[in-house]
């Protein structure tokens, strides 16, 4: 009997949360956010995704530049050392087959 009384008291109270619509007390559906809430939420997500994609493009470009510079530095080091093994491929009998 006390649980029935608690349920009736809970249904009689209407608590309105920010961004939510109040539903009639007898309605069994939960309070649902308004369409504007979702519009703002998804716009924010869309903006963040666009920003992250832009940053990713910049990072890829920077990595490509660094790889090119690393290749140039490697070639300079090889030339400075004058190691013929690293500058030109060796002819071996295996490659002639």
Image: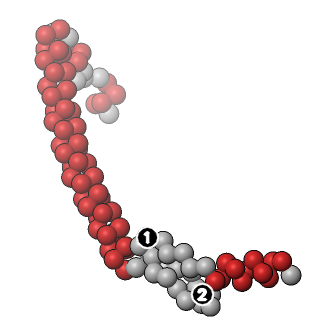
Q: Is residue 14 above or below residue 55?
A: below
Residue 64 shows in the view:
no
Residue 2 shows in the view:
yes
For the N terminus, give its image quadrant.
bottom right
For the C terminus, give its image quadrant.
top left
Residue 66 point in image, percent of width and height: 19, 32
Q: Residue at x 23, y 18 (%)?
A: 86
Residue 45 point in image, percent of width and height: 33, 63
Say few, some or many: other residues with alpha carbon within 10 Å of mark 2 (under 14 / 14 to 19 / 20 or more).
Answer: few
Residue 2 point in image, percent of width and height: 83, 77
Q: Residue at x 30, y 30 (%)?
A: 95
Q: Residue at x 22, y 24 (%)?
A: 89
The circle on residue 25 is 2
Q: Quadrant of residue 88?
A: top left
In the image shown, does 25 or 96 lie closer to the viewer?
A: 25
User: Nearer the N terminus, badge 1 or badge 2?
Assistant: 1
* Residue under label 1: 18
Q: Residue at x 29, y 68 (%)?
A: 43
- SS state under label 2: loop
The circle on residue 10 is none
């Amino acid at each position: 009997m006390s649980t029935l009384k608690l349920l009736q008291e809970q249904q009689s109270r209407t608590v309105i949360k920010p961004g939510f619509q109040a539903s009639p007390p007898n309605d069994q559906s939960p309070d649902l956010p308004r369409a504007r809430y979702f519009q703002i939420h998804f716009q924010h997500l869309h903006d963040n995704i666009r920003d992250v994609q832009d940053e990713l493009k910049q990072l890829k470009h920077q990595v490509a530049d660094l790889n090119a510079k690393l290749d140039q530095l490697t070639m300079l080091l090889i030339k400075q050392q004058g190691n013929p093994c690293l500058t030109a491929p060796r002819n071996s009998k295996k490659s002639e087959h």
